[in-house]
Image (spheres, rainbow, N blue to C red):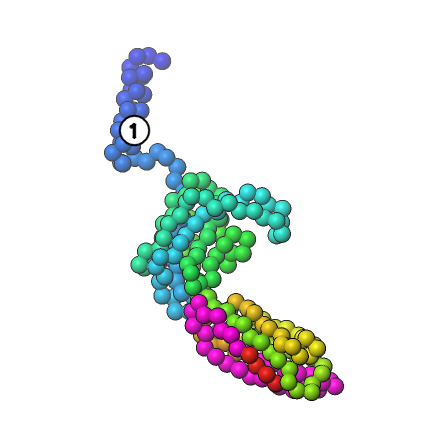
Amino acid sequence: MNLARIRFYLCLVANMYALNGCGLLDLSPTTTAKGKVVKYRTKKPISGVSVYAYERRFDCGAVCNTYHLTGDSTLTDAEGNFTLHVSQPDLLLSVYKRGYFGIFPGQSTLPDDRIRSGKNDFGTIPLKSYGAVDLTLVNKSNLSDSISYRLYSCGEEVNTGYETFERVWSGFTIKWSVEAECTVDLYVNARKNGQKRILLKESFYLNQNEVKKKTFEF
């Protein structure tokens, strides 16, 4: 290699460093995740949502994944938008704010929560408002076979069960996390001697972050 060519390459390298120092040329690899977090029902933006990146440390199937929270995090702005810069690819996106059902590794509701190399656009991410019920059923009648119940939130079935009346005599409790800011419906049926009988139809409104405690006797 002659002297002129060496000088050319030295000048080229120097210019590239100068451009990089001025912010005109970014030579470092960049991995980012962006998206918009909104309310599930109204599509209104949610500000102040914590957005994290997790690393999957060990994977042996559905029962024993372990995840490590990295230092990569950010918050959504007033319009629900976020841009998360991560330190490495192959991390998993997590989204959480108190009062909402969050998105966490291993139980994600996203079609794909993996942050790949380069720029990742997760689009619109809906979060459901969080609430819970603590409902006690007490048998005061002479029915002795069994009951079945169905629990609905926002018109969607979220829990169903079957209990013998022996368990219900002292009080059987349904504890369940459900979507809030809407109506919760509880239906209880009894079966005695093969005949079905409606025991209870109850509806009530559940506020965000509320735990509704109620006792029903029949």
Asked if residue 176 lies left or right of residue 39, the reply is right
Q: Who's the residue at 32% across and 36% down the image?
A: 26
- Classed neighbour count for the residue bearing mark 1: other residues with Cα under 10 Å, few (<14), some (14–19), many (≥20): some
- Tell me where the magenta segment starts and ends, as one range: 186-214
Number of on-image labels: 1
Q: Residue furthest right?
A: 193
Asked if residue 125 lies left or right of residue 26, the reply is right
Q: Is residue 110 visible?
A: no
Q: Residue furthest left?
A: 22
**Image position of 28 with respect to 33: above or below:** above
Q: Who's the residue at 48% across and 70% down the image?
A: 211
Q: Is residue 100 visible?
A: yes
Viewer-proximal residue, 31 or 194?
194
Viewer-proximal residue, 157 or 176?
176
**Image position of 99 with respect to 202: above or below:** above
Residue 48 located within the stretch drawn in magenta: no
Find residue 140 and report its image quarter. bottom right
- For disc 1, the marked residue is 16
Q: Who's the residue at 39% across and 37% down the image?
A: 29
Q: Residue furthest top?
A: 2
Provide residue 125's location: percent of width, then percent of height.
42, 59
Viewer-proximal residue, 25 or 210?
210
Residue 188 located within the stretch drawn in magenta: yes
Q: Who's the residue at 43% across and 72% down the image?
A: 207
Quadrant showing the C terminus: bottom right
Asked if residue 95 lies left or right of residue 193, the reply is left
Provide residue 133's location: percent of width, then percent of height.
52, 72
**Image position of 168 with respect to 6: above or below:** below
**Image position of 34 with respect to 188: above or below:** above
Q: Magenta stretch mostly in which secondary structure?
A: strand
- At mark 1, the secondary structure is helix
Find residue 167 and report its image quarter. bottom right
